[in-house]
Amino acid sequence: MTTERLHEIQQTLQSSGIDGWLLYNFRGSNVFATRLLALPSHIMCTRRYFYYIPAKGEPRKLVHRIEEWNLDTAPGEKTVYLSWQSLAEGVKKILAGSRSVAMEYSPNCAIPYVSNVDAGTIELVRSAGVSVVSSANLVAAFEAVWTEEQRSDNFVAAGHLRETVDAAFAFIRKRIAAGKKTTEYDAQQFMLKEFGRHGMWSEDAPNCSVNANSANPHYEPTKKVHSPLKEGDFVLLDLWAKSKKPHSVYADITWTGFIGESVPDEFEKIFQVVKGGRDAALMLVQERFRTGIPIYGWEVDAAARKYISDSGYGDQFVHRTGHSIGEVIHGNGANMDNLETHDERRLLPGTSFSIEPGVYLRDKFGVRSEIDVYITMKGEVVVTGLPMQEHVVAILGNSGSNVRRKISKSGGKKSRTGKSAKHGSKRGR
């Protein structure tokens, strides 16, 4: 841990009114402690260690006798323990004078993404006479905020991802028009090739799902398991990727289309419901940052969910509205969630997240519209990878020009921040 990062953490602790942040790790169980301390990769960590960062003053370490040098690259005073009795005594020693400490814990496991510390260790710390609060917002501040280089790379990647959507629809149109057998897997592999052509990659392959498969939010085709694409089919494309460079961050979008010259009303009707939920969530984020009123992840989900529920499809919206985006597709900041969890983490400047409501009609089809939102350090709300989808794409319309025509209403306009759109720049919802 650098001195600069230490000072940043202590300033955040002071402004939060928390006495300190206690990082605990056992055999790599706490990924946040691992990343924050940035220990040399060759070090063998087989015993428990604690690293306490007080809001003011020098950090304190607690390490086992056979691994007493493991934290030497991090600043602070060292205490060595050997027995289980001396471990408990050591915890009391390094926490002396503190009343409340933050740990990777979430009350009632409300936010499981943060709960990396086991209940027994929480009990051990509490036995030292301190209260334990969740480090969820601290983790977001030091894990989810992008650097300027990450932001710049992401805007480029987001632009390439949007180009890949258009190219994939054109690929399907060309194959269908030529009478060539085409499957979901073919479309998936085409998108992967486009990623490579643009210098991008993803840990998991993108998704192309047709008809009833699109009603399964986590369906993905494989070489052995896939369905054909043919005229009259509804198609959902979900794709996520990032630049091929260290510490790059993901872009993640979803579009839908119909293999025909025009889109039947049943598909467009559901899309407009989903789009309404998407836009309601986005407008709430814009309003809050414009007025300076804090906004939390659960509120964004509630806005989208209310619109879709009021439209009569609440029971078919079966996942959260969005997720944090970072170096991994599901990042460590606030999720847009008031369904699976009640995410009380605040949306922070310098972070990104998806807004992706969906309506899934079992055994028929499912519609999802996904955009990525980035909050600038000045609090501006930027939608990346413009334009957003406004209608279901008629893939065979006007020999393919319909792909552009259908989205031209938002293309070339300003972003919803009121400023010129910066065109450029998973698993699971």
Image (tube, rainbow, N blue to C red):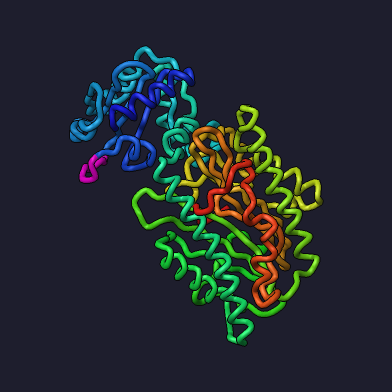
Quadrant holding the N terminus: top left
Q: Do we see residue 212 in this rendering?
A: no
Instruction: Please tell me whether residue 45 belongs to the stretch shown in magenta.
Output: yes
In this rendering, the answer to whether 176 lies above or below 139 is below
- Which residue does the image show at 59% across and 42% down from the upper left? 419
In this picture, is 14 found above or below 143?
above
Q: Nearer the viewer, residue 190 or 367?
A: 190
Query: Relative to the observer, which residue lies in front, 112 or 250?
Result: 250
**Horizontal placement of 108 versus 64: left or right?**
right
122 with respect to 299 (left or right): left
Residue 130 in percent (x, y) is at 43, 18
**x and y, in percent, of residue 187 in the image:** 54, 73
Q: Residue furthest top?
A: 97
Q: Please, which residue is most extreme toward the bottom here?
A: 179
Q: Is residue 302 left or right of residue 14?
A: right
Residue in the foreground of this view, choosing between 58 and 420: 420
Residue plotted at (41% across, 46% down)? 150
Residue drawn 72% across and 54% down? 274
Residue 84: quarter of image: top left
- Residue in the picture at 77% in, 47% down: 309
Q: Main secondary structure of the magenta part?
A: loop
Image quarter of residue 281: top right
Q: Tell me: residue 172, above or below residue 60.
A: below
**Viewer can see residue 193:** yes
Q: Position of residue 32 (x, y in %)?
A: 39, 38
Q: Does residue 263 belong to the magenta stretch?
A: no
Q: Which residues are magenta?
A: 40-46
